[in-house]
Image (tube, helix red, strand yellow):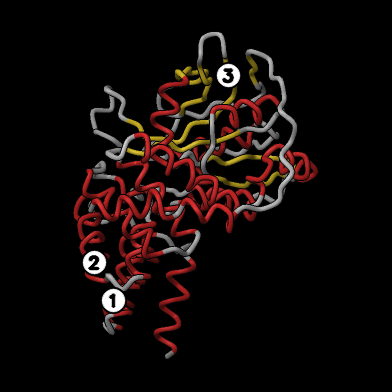
C-alpha cells in the first residue's frame, strides 16, 4: 500500500503541466466582513426530504412559490429514497421549472472564499456536507445546507438548515470539516442573464474539466498533509473518475476504504462503483452494492443500478434487467437505468 500512496501523491504531480489550461482568473476582490442575502422562504423539511426542501428554499429567492412536494415528486418519487444527488438537483432546476428563468450549476472543490464571494454577489448556494446532529441520534449522514450569508468577525457561515432551523450559524471550522466529506460540492442558482458574470467569478473553475483538476489537487494536498484522511483519498478517487483515470481512482478508493469511511458513505456517493467497473472489478462492485442494499433497506436505487452494470459485464443479462427494473420501480425518472434495460431487452 505504501507504493500506492507514493504513486497517487507523487506520480500525478507532473501531470499538472499537461492538465493546466490558460485561464483568466478574476482579480482578487475585497469583500465586506459580513453579508446576508434576504428574501428566502424557509421550508422545514418533511420526512427524509432535506434535498428538495433546501432546493425549494434556494429557488424562493427568485420568486418560486411552490413547496417542497413538487421537487420531491420529481427528485425522489419514493419517499424512502435515501439520497438525492447534486446533479439531480441541477437537472430539476434546469428542466422542470420553466415558469422562472433560473438555472443551476454544480462544481467541486469549493472553499469558504468561494461561498463568501458568491453570496456577496447575490447567488444562493447549496452545499452538501456530512451531518451527525445529536438530537437525530442516527449517526453520520449527508445533509444539504442553503448558504445565505457569512460573518468574518465571528467566523461563521449563515445557513437555512431544513432540519435544524433558519438563520442557523455554523463556524467556518465546522463547514470546512464537514463539507470535505462531500468533496466540497456546491450548487449555484442564478438567473439566465447572470451566467456570464457567474462564470467570471468562478475563474478557471468555470471550466468543468479544470474544476475536476483543481478539486483533485485540493484533495491531494489534504492527503499529503494527512495520509490517514480517508475523505481526502475518496475525493481524489472521485475526481480521478471524472478525469477517466480509473486505475489510479481505484487505488485511491482502496486506500480510502482501508482507512475507514462512514458506513452510509455509498448511500450518497457512487464513484467507487464507476472506478471498479472500469477496471473490471465486478465482484467488488457487487459486494459494495450488497452492503448498501442491506444497510439501507433497499432504498438506494443507485446500488441496484451499478450492480446491474456489473451483472451485464458478467453476462448475467436476466439479473441485470431485474436490477434495472428495481431501480425504475423506485424512481421512474432514472433514465440511465431505463436506457440500459431497454438496450438489453431490445438485443
At numbered mark 3, what does the secondary structure look like: helix, strand or loop?
strand
Q: In x, y percent, where is residue 255?
A: 27, 50
Q: Nearer the viewer, residue 64 or 321?
A: 321
Q: Is residue 19 above or below residue 102?
A: below
Instruction: Residue under label 3, please give it.
Output: 150
Which of disc 2 and disc 3 is earlier in sequence? 3
Q: Secondary structure at mark 2?
A: helix
Q: Is residue 209 above or below residue 132?
A: below
Return the x and y of residue 142 as percentages of the image width and height: 37, 39
Q: Residues within 10 Å of mark 2 (few under 14, many from 20)?
A: many
Q: Tag 2 or tag 1, which sits nearer the N-term?
A: 2
Task: Judge by depth and name the residue closer to the eye, 63 or 118.
Answer: 118
In the rendered image, the vertical position of residue 291 relative to residue 138, given as above or below: below
Disc 1 on helix, strand or loop? helix
The residue indicated by pointer 2 is 286
Residue at horizontal 39%, vertical 53%? 237
Q: Quadrant of residue 187?
A: top right
Residue 46: quarter of image: top left
Amino acid at each position: 500500500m505504501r507504493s500506492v500512496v507514493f504513486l497517487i501523491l507523487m506520480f500525478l504531480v507532473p501531470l499538472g503541466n499537461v492538465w493546466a489550461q490558460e485561464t483568466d482568473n478574476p482579480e482578487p476582490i475585497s469583500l465586506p466582513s459580513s453579508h446576508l442575502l434576504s428574501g428566502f422562504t424557509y421550508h422545514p423539511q418533511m420526512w427524509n426530504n432535506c434535498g428538495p426542501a433546501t432546493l425549494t428554499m434556494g429557488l424562493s429567492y427568485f420568486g418560486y412559490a411552490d413547496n417542497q412536494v413538487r421537487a420531491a415528486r420529481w427528485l425522489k418519487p419514493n419517499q424512502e429514497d435515501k439520497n438525492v444527488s447534486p446533479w439531480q438537483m441541477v437537472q430539476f432546476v434546469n428542466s422542470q421549472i420553466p415558469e422562472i428563468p433560473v438555472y443551476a450549476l454544480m462544481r467541486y472543490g469549493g472553499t469558504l472564499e468561494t461561498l463568501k464571494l458568491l453570496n456577496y454577489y447575490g447567488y444562493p448556494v447549496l452545499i452538501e456536507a456530512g451531518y451527525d446532529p445529536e438530537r437525530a441520534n442516527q449517526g453520520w449522514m449527508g445533509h444539504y445546507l442553503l448558504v445565505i450569508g457569512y460573518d468574518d468577525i465571528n467566523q461563521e457561515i449563515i445557513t437555512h438548515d431544513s432540519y435544524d432551523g433558519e438563520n442557523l450559524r455554523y463556524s467556518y471550522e465546522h463547514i470546512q470539516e464537514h463539507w470535505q466529506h462531500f468533496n466540497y460540492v456546491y450548487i449555484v442558482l442564478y438567473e439566465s442573464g447572470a451566467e456570464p458574470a457567474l462564470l467570471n467569478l468562478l475563474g478557471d473553475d468555470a471550466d468543468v474539466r479544470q474544476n475536476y483538476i483543481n478539486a483533485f489537487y485540493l484533495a491531494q494536498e489534504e492527503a499529503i498533509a494527512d495520509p490517514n484522511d480517508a475523505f481526502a483519498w475518496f475525493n481524489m478517487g472521485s475526481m480521478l473518475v471524472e478525469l477517466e483515470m480509473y486505475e489510479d481512482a481505484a487505488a485511491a478508493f482502496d486506500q480510502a476504504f482501508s482507512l475507514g469511511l462512514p458506513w452510509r458513505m455509498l448511500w450518497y456517493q457512487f464513484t467507487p462503483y464507476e472506478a471498479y467497473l472500469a477496471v473490471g472489478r465486478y465482484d467488488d462492485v457487487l459486494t459494495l452494492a450488497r452492503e448498501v442494499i442491506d444497510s439501507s433497506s433497499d432504498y438506494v436505487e443507485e446500488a441496484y443500478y451499478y450492480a446491474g452494470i456489473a451483472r451485464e459485464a458478467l453476462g448475467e443479462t436476466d439479473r441485470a434487467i431485474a436490477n434495472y427494473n428495481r431501480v425504475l420501480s423506485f424512481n421512474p425518472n432514472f433514465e440511465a437505468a431505463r436506457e440500459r434495460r431497454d438496450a438489453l431487452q431490445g438485443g
